[in-house]
Image (cartoon, rainbow, N blue to C red):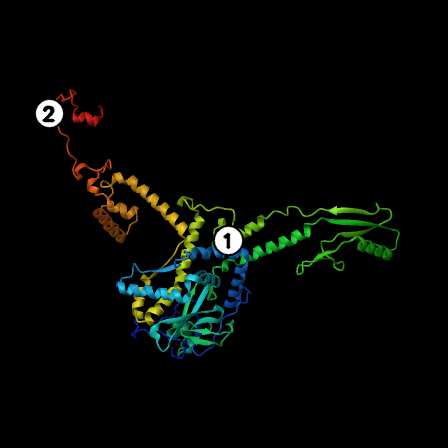
Amino acid sequence: MSQLFGYSLERAKKDSAKGPSFVRKESDDAATPVAGGGYFGTAIDLDGTYKDENDLIRRYRAMSIHPECDRAIDDVVNEAIAGELDDSPVDVELSNLKVSGTIKKRIREEFFNILRLLDFDKKAYDIFRRWYIDGKIYYHKMIDTKNPRGGITELRYIDPRKIRKVVELERPKDKQFVDPRTMEAQIAGKSAEYYVYNPKGLRAMETSGIKVAPDAIAFAHSGLKDMNKNVIMSHLHKSIKALNQLRMIEDSLVIYRLSRAPERRIFYIDVGNLPKQKAEQYLREVMSRYRNKLVYNADTGEIRDDRKFMSMLEDFWLPRREGGRGTEITTLPGGQNLGELEDVKYFQKKLYRALNVPESRLESDSTFNLGRAAEITRDEVKFQKFVTRLRKKFSELFHDLLKTQLVLKGIISIEEWDDMSEHIQYDFVADNYFSELKDQEILNERLNLVNVMDPFAGRYFSVEHIRRKILRQSDSEIKEIDKAIKKEIASGQLPDPASIDPVTGEPIAGGGMEQPMEEPTEDITSTGVEAVAPQDYKRGEF
């Protein structure tokens, strides 16, 4: 990799136990395989769907400007990137990572350094939106070559139309089994990965560019891949047809309304016994005398009388010979049912379904109840799961940057990262109001169930079972809660459960066992009133 522009994170050299394979390793980043020493290029789609990835990205960006599509994208990005002004949109979760507290502290510090380099607190919405529309995002990880242990110094955004990943396969000695189209026989040879960058853009058959080491590029993609053409697609791809249909319906609706909305008149002009030429001349004179041709200039906002042009909205002028009914004016009715928009609403809903956004969000006057979990629609649940998947795929950007930062600064090695990476998660801040109401509703339902099961605790259910299965408390939460309860009892904030009657909930006299009532020594008290037996008190007869 020394001949490439950039840097490489080297692993410890060790012999691989893997044998050769006749199948090329699948790459989920749509890297283009090329033969060593050969040329670089991609196939052209002759069907006309799209020529290359650049054509797709331009189409996605044009789609994002459309009002309905922009509104749907805005809903997706707002759900994925939430948080208050004083809150970071994302945090690193290290609860499952089995390392020392010092290492965890260093990892958190470097993660926040990455967020600072990205300016994620301010640009989180723009970065996620850019990734969602294009389907991929690239950053150049810049370091100080004289002091690489200083880590990443700057992150620069790279237009995805100007960069592409390439896998170069070594040519086998036996060229008899080489397929020049699939390169499948070259699997047994070693391969080298790098990025090709061209500031002018990489077209379908572009071959020139700068080779960049893969460790110098941070890359995250949507996860959608055209397996037939080996192209990464955006989540907007499946909505291309729906958006085009909506556009055509709206344009045709506008044309129809403009052409059928006005009431046009038919003028029957009596020309008598005039010859044909003179009759036509007389008809033109009458038209120019009574006809109004008002034209609105949208650029200047002026209205002028322009009689040189004909339009489809003008009146009809027809000659009539002698013997007819003479000059007559009739009116053609305008178009009917011009206010119906059912077809437009259908394609709008179809577009929202293609973008995985609930149709209920299309209606501006519709309300979304956040109070009861049972009232949340199935579409909203599916939408939340879709947003969660988007967050997972976008987190690959943080994963790559964090790996480079930790390895460069010598906090961990590459081999240690391979073992730790699966235990490092990223926690995105949810919508505070919605998540709070949802958590409260779920906790309320759990507590109601605990209240129903409480009389059976100790007979059919244990307390530990209720805490683990019903309240969904983890081992760490149980230990933390028990410790806090003991501390609050010792400080006097909570009463001791041993001093509380479990049936009545009243404190027990003496702070312990209930004291038995004393038996009366005499039947008649000093006041002359007959004494009452203790069993009669319990029956409530006196």
Cα separation between marks 2 and 1: 87 Å
Residue at x 18% of width, y 39% of height: 511
Residue designated by label 1: 352
Q: Position of residue 15 (x, y in %)?
A: 29, 74
Query: What residue type is disc 1 on?
Result: Tyr
Q: Position of residue 14 (x, y in %)?
A: 29, 74
- Label pair 2/1, CB-CB below 8 angstroms: no
Location of residue 36 with respect to 351 vertically, above or below:
below
Residue at x 34% of width, y 66% of height: 110
Residue designated by label 2: 521
Q: Is residue 223 visible?
A: no
Residue at x 28% of width, y 40% of height: 453
Q: Position of residue 137 (x, y in %)?
A: 45, 66
Task: Give the position of the C terminus as an image quadrant.
Answer: top left
Element carrying mark 1: helix
Q: Position of residue 141 (x, y in %)?
A: 40, 71
> Furthest-left residue in view?
521
Point out which mark residue 417 bears: none
Element carrying mark 2: loop
User: Seen in the image, is 308 located left or right of residue 402?
Assistant: right
User: Seen in the image, is 463 located left or right of residue 124?
Assistant: left
